[in-house]
Image: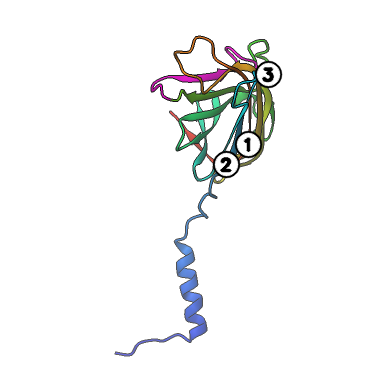
Amino acid sequence: MKLATLPLPYLGLALGLLTSCGRDEAPAPAAEATYTRSVTYLDTASPSRLDSTFKSPVLKPFAWRRGTNFTIFLEPTTDRETVAFGLVRANLPANLVGTYTLKTKLDATKDADFSYRINTPNSPGYASLYDKTIYTPMGSLTITAYDATHQVVSGRFTVELTNVSDPFGPVYQSIKRRCNLALQGTFTNAPIKDIE
């Protein structure tokens, strides 16, 4: 029996065509995020300030499309806290890109709901929640890019809350220290998931 052979240049071309035929699209780019939390106390007790920075891979950004809502989350995997921004899908452009101001208890006509939840240290099951129901968050969320092919979104945010209760104060404390709370960060290629 006689076997047919191909010259080496043609063999390489044939192998390249075979491997490219079954190749899927490039995988989605890796998600990355960072944010800084600053707590500045309004009294003279110590400590006067607490700063923390969270970065990937400890920090996970992601987004949900659920019904009429589009929500972006940032969650550190080692600390039990969540930063979230909620938008109404009907109010968003097709490419999602834009700057969205934060709603407050006095002005619900703005663009985005904001919430920050942090579990109270040494008190399992209790959490401090900072949103427009009690406080007046100031700042914005900016979506800088949306990749429809890979279903990922990128952006940045800044949030300030003034004269709020201490997120690290014990639950049983009747009068907590007052502070200013500031959050700022960026997220890149946060995966979007459709939630039924």
The answer to whether residue 143 is above or below residue 163 is: below
Q: Secondary structure at mark 3?
A: loop
Which dot, 2 or 3, sits closer to the camera?
A: 2
Q: Position of residue 109 (x, y in %)?
A: 68, 15
The span picked out in magenta is 122-137
| Majority secondary structure of magenta residues | loop
Find out whether the residues at labels 1 and 2 contact each other: C-beta distance under 8 Å: yes
Q: Disc 1 residue type?
A: Gly
The answer to whether residue 125 is above or below residue 16 is: above
- The answer to whether 3 appears left or right of 58 in the picture is left
N-terminal label among 1 and 2: 2
Q: Give the residue pinned by disc 2.
A: 33
Residue 110 is marked as 3
Q: Disc 2 residue type?
A: Ala
> Quick one: which residue is furthest to the bottom in this view?
2
N-terminal label among 2 and 3: 2
Q: Residue at x 52, y 49 (%)?
A: 28
Q: Could you give the CA–CA distance between mark 1 and mark 2, rounded to whole angstroms?
A: 7 Å
The answer, for residue 28, to whether it is visible in the render is yes
Q: Residue at x 68, y 19 (%)?
A: 110
Q: Residues within 10 Å of mark 2 (few under 14, many from 20)?
A: many
Say which quarter of the image contains residue 130. top right
The answer, for residue 95, to whether it is visible in the render is no
Residue 185 is marked as 1
Say which quarter of the image contains residue 47. top right
Q: Residue at x 52, y 19 (%)?
A: 129
Which dot, 3 or 1, sits closer to the camera?
A: 1
Q: Along the line of sight, which residue is nearer the eye, 157 or 177?
A: 177
